[in-house]
Amino acid sequence: METLRDMKCTLSIVVPVYRSASILPNLAEQIHNEMCKEALEGRFELLLVNDGSPDNSWDVIRALAAKNSFVRGISLRRNFGQHNAIMAGLNYATGDFVVIMDDDLQHPPQAIGSMIRALSEGYDVCYTNYLNRKHVWWKKLGSRFNDWAATCLLDKPKGLYLSSFKAIRKDVVKEIIQYDGPYTYVDGLILDVTRSITTVDIEHQARCEGVGNYTLRSSFSLCLGMATSFSILPLRIASYTGFAMAALSVIVIIVVCVQKLLHPELPAGWASLIATILLVGGVQTICIGLIGEYLGRTYLKLNHKPQFVIGSTT
């Protein structure tokens, strides 16, 4: 098997950081040890992107960068969200291959070598497939829903799990960072660029300490961003729903007219009339709100809402 030493490659590891000050020293140490085992000493960089973390993560990053030559720190002026922080890191990455991973050590650094070797076979992207996920039940349910949504909205290959732990070739990263919209979904950008994707199986680790930063609201926001930033399918669904409701209304009108002609004694249906008005009004409100979501995102992009803002770097 070809080793990473034989490949003569360079590697960038991008980690968005939020509320993980106490974990970062352990993360940097484990990554350094694994890269030494893979003969990448002096040929890799660890980019820690502080996403406006309210704890002292930036102070820890600065200390790690002063102590370790492979650590580079980027601090955003405020919290822009995980995917926007990743985009900031990708803009600074210099390696032939780029690995994206979380800051909580649930992604084992031991898998990085396998991911890079998978890319050396000619693939553009390598995702990881968790064998035993350590997430709570609602997070697993949310991931399944997002996975289904990505399949429908982004034409994601069935069976591919869009893990946040992945490796990407440099030329694909160059295409991804051309996107300058304020609402970023990295996996959507990847699927826009390439379908040359493979996976490797990994053991999902328990969080080193503390609790995860992703909430149910964050998962819903991510799904909404995926839908309205990278697909027009929701608009088409709204159009189809409008046509269906119009057709149903015509049918109901015909039925009511026929019944009235055949049975003049039938009283006017106040309840059915109100129910119909509420149903049609509700559908119209949803469709208008959906269109407004698209227009709002377009408005913010035209007004150059920043994807991220760099405060300082090490």
Image (spheres, rainbow, N blue to C red):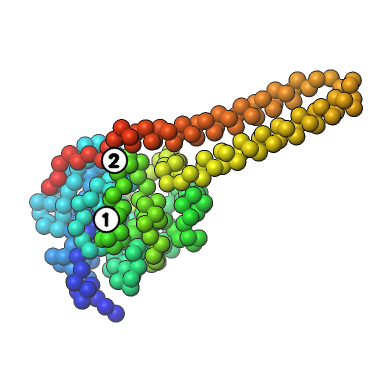
Spot the residue most to the bottom: 1
Q: What percent of the width, then of the height, locates residue 232?
A: 48, 44
Amino acid type, mark 2: Gln
- Depth check: 243 or 8 in front? 243
- In this rendering, is residue 301 above or below 211? above
Residue at disc 2, secondary structure: loop
- Depth check: 36 or 150 in front? 150
**Residue position marked by numbered label 2 in the rendering:** 307
**Residue position marked by numbered label 1 in the rendering:** 174
The answer to whether any part of residue 1 appears in the image is yes
- In this rendering, is residue 62 above or below 301? below
Amino acid type, mark 1: Lys
- Depth check: 251 or 76 in front? 251
- Disc 1 to disc 2, how far (Cα)? 16 Å
Q: Residue at x 31, y 32 (%)?
A: 303
Left or right: 260 in relation to 245: right
- In this rendering, is residue 200 above or below 289? below
Q: What percent of the width, then of the height, locates residue 149?
A: 50, 49
Residue 236's quadrant in the figure? top right
- Which class describes the residues within 10 Å of circle 1: few (<14), some (14-19), or many (20+)? few
Q: What percent of the width, then of the height, locates residue 207?
A: 34, 53
- Which class describes the residues within 10 Å of circle 2: few (<14), some (14-19), or many (20+)? some
